[in-house]
Image (cartoon, coloured by chain):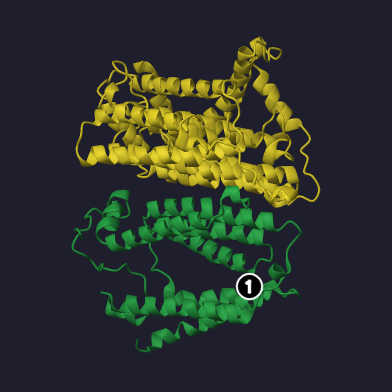
Amino acid sequence: MQFINDFLSGQWNWIVGMLPEAAKPYAMPGLVIFIVLNVTLGACSYLILLERKLSAWMQDRLGPNRVGPMGLLQPVADMLKLLLKEDVIPGHVNKFLFVLAPGISVFTTFLAFAVVPFGPVPKGLTAGDGQFPFIIAPGIDLGVVFIFAIGSLAVYGIILGGWASNNKYSALGCLRASAQVVSYEIPLGMSVVGLALLCGTMSIEKILLFQAERGIYGWNIWYQPLACVIFFIAAMAEAQRLPFDLAECEQELIGGWHTEYSAMKWGLFFLAEYTHVITISFLTSILFFGGWHLPFIAETTSNYSGVWMVKVGVLLAKVSVFIVVIQMLRWTIPRFRFDQLMSLAWLCLIPLAMVNIVMVMVVKQFELNEWWLLPGSAAIFLAAGLMGTQSTKPFARRVAAPIETPGHGGHGHAHAH
Amino acid sequence: MNWSPENGMLLLPLALGWLAVWWLLPREKPRGRILGGLIGVAALLVLQATVLPPAGDLVHDVMFYAFAAAAILCGGLMITDKNPVYAALWFALTTLAVCGLFLLNSAPFLAAATIIVYAGAIVVTFLFVIMLAQQGGIGGYDREAFQPGMASLLSFALLATLLFSLQEWGGIDGKAADEARHGQFVSVPTTVQANLLSQAPESNPREIGSLRVLGRSLFTDYLYAVELAGTVLLVATIGAIAIAPRRSQGHL
């Protein structure tokens, strides 16, 4: 392993040595951004292939197998198709906003990745000491809040895309999608508050280190399993992945807010979606599953040569597991109805997240053993499940159909549900 | 407050700004936008002698001017645009530019929270309402400003009181005498009206504006204000739920 280290740092020093003096501080951030952008773009195109293969496997089909060995060159063909297709801009659209919308979608999802560490971030890193930082923007104190702030701007891509298309189907799809995204931001944000209270920081790197220093029983999943579930569900809804993709409903409805988009502009929306999936998987494995930490081989104390490769490998393995889980959920859970989707966020996830925060506060305030959080989360989860079942009386009317009141029957169209 | 010659320096830019906004507000008969824009630029140029911060680090200065110019430009476009959808989008951009200024002044949490709350939620709600309400094209109430002269005059009177009081505040609050004489108001307050729970501020300058220091300040220095605001919001929430019609009544 040592010779790979030496080779890489030797090459890098040679490249930096050729640069003019003024450009040297920007060399390392430039390298990191270059690597992240290209790896993410490549990973996105192969994730599409993986998704198609998994779908085919789950539906007992073969999937794409014509281009290249076992269909491995299919992403290349897809990309060529997207680039060479005629790029239609329909008449009477607002051209500027129409072109801007996919750009906003891609921009926000990539910008969110700036604070996500993808390897062992050196402790106490300062700009310009020449170490590879494994994160685009090291030392951001508010990593999680930054991601939510950027993520809340992603809704503009949806709104502008739907509105600028000058199409009623697009407008309806954009209203649905943006209502969903805005609603699910709240449980997403609230689910990590407990985490911040436990770890005493909002910085993603510090949360990772906090878990790694405490070993496998320090992973946040042991203390915040409920928050993990809420975070994962809300993040999937933010990314509009199935089972939350009812803005598109690609099997039965017209394609939501991107109905009028074609060629690469359509592709950009899906590039944004896949980048979002990657970011979600990174965040879940870092915030709740210890990031690059794995007992015995990747601890904070292990310092054999090339340990960074093992750590990056461990993190990427965890991330791939979550990506595959997200893709398999697509063919496992049926799609929600819109009112079910809204009541899931407002009546289920938000109260659960609130109760979870209160539980963490109680444990911190009275200095109880943190292990109480595990049975506590399970108890809250079970209680919520019990209250949600239709047979439990006080909560049953919530899921019942709205009652038609007499006197309004004559003009039923006035009921805008 | 006593009238001082420094206050007079603000009157000309305020008048010019009022003229520019009044000229640019939407009318039935379109007016030249260039003339209004030039008057606005002149107002800013006259004002800059008073309000600009002293030059510092180059990158910092460039970013400050970029964000400040974007905020003023987008704010002006927001109130003068005829299309309400564009106006909402300009408002979002104004919010983003102001958040950039927050970031420059090492208040990252304030910036992130403002983006989440304003740009991410409130402007989106505006856009919803506007898009749903604008089915048949732009309404007459958007094509023409309602009482443009009175509205812009009142808003500039508000701006004037804000500037005057800021100037007064900057002049007395532990400033060097020559700075105060030039009417500069650029420093942070050195004292906070502190209550009993107040703790000593963080000594490390990098920590100012961080989540830890912000939380401590909110729950010690400004405890009453925070609790009061929380109570008001809670009452508003309960009121909204109470006013909203039930689904069984057939109105939702």
Residue B173, position as x, y percentages in the image = 28, 75
What chain is the yellow one? A
State which chain disc 1 sits on: B
Most foreground residue, A131 or B181: B181
**Res. A314 in view:** yes
Instruction: Identify the residue shown where x is 58% and y is 33%.
Output: A244
Residue reaching furthest front? Answer: A406
Residue A23 appears anywhere in the view: no
* B39 in relation to A148, above or below: below
Q: Is residue A322 above or below residue A135?
A: above
Indicate the quadrant containing the C terminus of chain A: top left, top right, bottom left or bottom right. top right
Q: Pinpoint residue B110: horizontal percent, then vertical percent.
A: 40, 55
- Amino acid type of the residue tagged 1 in the rendering: Gly
Chain identity for the colour green used in the image: B
Q: Is residue A209 above or below residue B214?
A: above
In front here: A171 or A70?
A: A171
Q: Is residue A384 left or right of residue A124?
A: right
Which residue corresponds to the image point at 52% horizontal and 51% vertical from the top-left?
A: B121
Q: Give the quadrant of residue B170.
A: bottom left
- A7 or A191: nearer the eye? A191
Dividing the picture into quadrants, the one containing residue B161 is: bottom left
Q: Is residue A336 left or right of residue A396?
A: right
| Element assignment for label 1 | helix
Q: Quadrant of residue B104?
A: bottom left
Q: Residues within 10 Å of mark 1 (few under 14, many from 20)?
A: some
Judge from the rendering whether residue A412 lies leftward or rightward of residue B126; answer left or right.
Answer: right
Q: Nearer the viewer, residue A238 or B58?
A: A238
Residue designated by label 1: B37
Query: Where does the image place residue B153, in percent across and percent down from the top left?
Result: 56, 81
Viewport quadrant of the N terminus of chain A: top left
Q: Position of residue A406 (x, y in %)?
A: 67, 48
